[in-house]
Every structure is written in C-alpha cells, then in structure tokens.
Amino acid sequence: MTPKLTQTVALATTAVAALTAAGPVAAQDAERMLKWAHVYEVSEAYHTCAVAAHDELVASTDGRYGIEVFPASSLGKEVDINEGLSLGTVDIIYTGQLFAGRAYGPVAIGGAPYMFRDYAHWDAFRNSDLFEELSQGYADATGNQIEALTYYGNRHVTSNKPITTPEDMDGLKIRVPNAPLYMMFPEAVGANPTPIAFAEVYLALQQGTVDAQENPLPTIQAKKFYEVQSDINLTGHITDALLTIVGGPAWSSMDEADQQALSAAIDNAAACATEAIRDQEAELVEWFKEQGVNVNEVDREPFIEAVKAMHMGDMASWDQETYDRLQAIGQES
C-alpha cells in the first residue's frame, strides 16, 4: 500500500522531469497499455504525475506494461469509470472516496465533511492500519484493488456572495458531486445540494443553474470556476483525497512481480501529486486575490458543530468503531 511521501517524492519528481524532457510517449513503448481514466484537466498534477508513471512502469516490467492516461472525463463521468473497473473498459482510475463508497460504504468515511482535524490527521490515516483494512474490505466487496490515496486538498465553497456563517448558506443551491455523502455538509447548514457531473459545473455556474460549488483551490483554478464566481469562502469542510484503484480484471491478469511494479508506479504518482497540491494550496490564496476574487476567512467551528451532529446519523455508511478509530488516529499518547 501507499508509502510515506518522504520515501517517494524524489523518485516521482524525477519521473515527471524526465517525462517533460522526453515529450509524449508512444503506445508501442509497451506490449500492453493500461487505461488510466480520470475526470481532471491535463494541467493538473493528478494527470501529469499519472502520465509520468508510464515510463517507470515500462522500465520496471521490461516493456510488458505501460500506461495511457485519459483525462477530463474522456472515458466517462466518475460513476461511469467506477463501473468500468469491473467491466474491464478501464484498468486504473482516480476516484473520490465517496464514489468508491457506493460499492463499499465504510471506505467513504475518509471523504466525509470535517472528518479530519488537519492535514497531519489525514496523512496519519492514509498510513494507518485502518486505511489498510478499509481498502481490503473494498477489495473483498468489488474485486478491485485500492493502491494509493492522493491528497486532493481542502474543499471550499465558492459563491457570488460572502459566506462566513452556516446561516449564509441557508437555501443556497450548491453543486455537489453525484455521490450521496456529498450531501452531508450542505444539508447540515441548510443549503440545497444539487448533483451535477464535474464536466458540466462551469456552465451550470455561468448559467445560474446553481448558486455555488465546492472544491479545493487548485481545482477551482484549473476548472476556472473563479471566472464565474466572485467569492471563495475558506470553509475547509472536507480534507479530500483521491483513491487510485486498479480494476480486478487488469490486476488478476498480471503476475506478482508486475503487480508490485504497478503498485510502485502508482505510489510514486500519488506522492508526486500530493506534493504538488500541497504547494499550490500554499500559494493560491494570494493568486486568487490578484485576480480580483474575494477570498473570505471563515470561523469553521460553527460549521464543524453543525456537521458533527450528522457524523453518526442516517447518512453514515460506517459503524461507530470505525469512526472512533479514525478520530483516535494521531492522538495516541
């Protein structure tokens, strides 16, 4: 499973640099090209780091396997590519934990709002026995293999008005991804969650189909949501991450050595993207201000209290023991 960032960042960064210097790689570089699908833009680190994994995998499997990356929903929306794993129409995907939770509920806990105290808590979780157990539970339920957890960033609300209290969200029509647990945060603060596919969000905001959306700062920049929203409100309501999942048909067709090579390449891609997103988050508040966007600081405590009341409510797809174990991570004496 995923090694710590410090063990892999240097390798991953080197891989990206080598890829950039060499230019695009050809499909004939490997006997079999694994299809890696996602819904993000080619400019984003998730994509560039996944592309860099191709050269690493070709080298480590002596040309038996390579990776072709399909960005920006080109092989389907997030629900589609999750289904494609078992069908064999895609081999590897990035997906949100709440989408994976449709197949195995407990794995969604890491994507629930205000589930983590901070980045350190999340980082400890992804290297924990609990995450290993949740990944195994998902594998048992689906036949697909979770191979890494990549930092996606703190999700914040964008809107056309300042939002600094839960009351400011009352009745707000906010776009959320099409997975049930994304409804938890809006419902806790009285907003009206509206599922819309990722590729359609910009137009929905531009046309006023919804009033707001929520995503991390790097995604807000990459998808240009700031062009059609005047305010970014730093709610930090989900410390979010992407699972990298290998489909059962692809995984079972590989021998153990090639499986290990693929795992290593995926781990390096996760380290590469995590480092890049962390760096971007540190810089983007000032960048958005320079673009004329209003960036509003938020007292998160009232939001946290509103959401905590729902953590073990009807929407929870995990049990009390799993919740308690996650909350205890990083607090051991």
Image: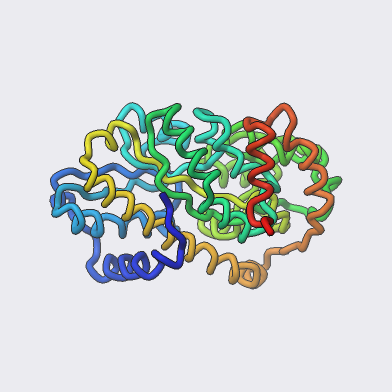
Residue 251 picture quarter: top left
Q: Position of residue 278 (x, y in %)?
A: 54, 65
Q: Position of residue 122 (x, y in %)?
A: 59, 54
Tally the numbered discs.
0
Q: Position of residue 154 (x, y in %)?
A: 62, 55
Query: From what the image shows, is residue 114 above or below residue 138?
Result: below
Residue 187 picture quarter: top right
Q: Position of residue 281 (x, y in %)?
A: 58, 65
Q: Nearer the viewer, residue 58 or 83?
A: 58
The residue depicted at 38 percent of the width and 34 percent of the height is: 144
The residue depicted at 60 percent of the width and 69 percent of the height is: 282
Query: From what the image shows, is residue 77 above or below residue 239?
Result: above
Q: How is the image coloured?
A: rainbow
Q: Is residue 192 visible?
A: yes
Query: From what the image shows, is residue 182 above or below residue 295?
Result: above
The residue depicted at 55 percent of the width and 60 percent of the height is: 218
Q: Is residue 227 visible?
A: no
The residue depicted at 53 percent of the width and 41 percent of the height is: 97
Q: Nearer the viewer, residue 140 or 305?
A: 140
In the rendered image, the quadrant that contains the C terminus is: bottom right
Name the residue at the front extreme.
Answer: 333
